[in-house]
Amino acid sequence: MTVHIDIQEPIDYILHFASPASPIDYLKIPIQTLKVGSLGTHNLLGLAKAKKARILIASTSEIYGDPLVHPQSEDYYGNVNSIGPRGVYDEAKRFQEAITMAYHRFHGVETRIARIFNTYGPRMRLNDGRAIPAFMGQALRGEDLTVFGDGSQTRSFCYVDDLIEGIYRLLFSDFSNPVNLGNPDEISIQDFALEILKLTNSNQKICFKPLPKDDPLKRQPDIKLAKKVLNWQPKTSREEGMKMTFAFFQNVSDKQLYKIDHKDFSKHIKH
């Protein structure tokens, strides 16, 4: 994607989801993360312009950084450390939004921007580096659950089926500005870890480790705009979604369950 894209056939829609999204990935490839958000987006916008195609950009709640406004609505500009380790992902996405809107305003390209909040579901990687696969993998291995900081930081988890419905509705809407897509059902990480222990019928404990630099303390989407312009809101409760997700993880092989490099993994887990 970081080189010119030339496709001869007609194109109606482009969905740009290319980017590592987990710290365990983007901290290993920071330059590539920046390039796919900037050069890659530029190339796809050029392709959309040439083909007169509609393009949907997958942005992120990390646009808001460690927010000073709660919950986060689309008109909040964010609180991002541009030179911190997480900046390679956050700023790539912020640039992605900026160039997308520039193509929309200057060239008239039909653009859609989805600001995606924490999403989960079956087929996540156990070494993905985020709270749900981390906790479930640890529970299945009989390990204590690792919580970073004091566990008071919050997240809001959206089941993947609900997210896909929101993306579909956004793609076929007439709305070009960014739209939050996520589940506003907020929970602290410590309370969430306790939910996982109960769900997995585990006797493990919770162990606390230092909070990574610039890790957001709050994360909750304001989805009033999505309700208004897309007639969308999540339908799957966290209890129901977690049961389906855990059922998937219970069926992964022992090889998959234990192939993680724990020393490397523990440095980069994101909650």
Image (tube, rainbow, N blue to C red):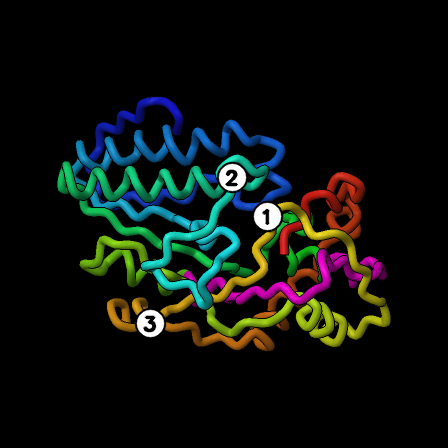
Q: Which label number is shown at residue 37?
A: none
Could you tell which of marks 2 and 1 lies nearer the N-terminus?
Answer: 2
Could you tell which of marks 3 and 1 lies nearer the N-terminus?
Answer: 1
Q: Which label number is shown at residue 224?
A: 3
Q: Are marks 3 and 1 in contact (CB under 8 Å)?
A: no
Q: Which label number is shown at residue 214?
A: 1
The quadrant the N terminus occupies is top left
Please state if 242 lies on the left or on the right of 159 as rendered: right
Quadrant in the rendering for residue 178: bottom left
| Residue at (13% x, 42% y) in the render | 108
Q: CA distance from mark 3 to mark 2?
A: 28 Å
Residue 21 appearing in the image:
yes
Task: Find numbered disc 3 in the image and state the secondary structure of the residue it sits on.
Answer: helix
Question: Is residue 2 found inside the magenta-colored segment of the image?
Answer: no
Q: Which residues are magenta?
A: 137-163
Q: Are marks 2 and 1 in contact (CB under 8 Å)?
A: yes
Please state if 266 lies on the left or on the right of 46 as rendered: right
Residue lying farthest to the front in this orientation: 68
Could you tell which of marks 3 and 2 lies nearer the N-terminus?
Answer: 2
Task: Find numbered disc 2 in the image and state the secondary structure of the residue it sits on.
Answer: helix
Residue bearing mark 2:
87
Q: CA distance from mark 3 to mark 1?
A: 27 Å
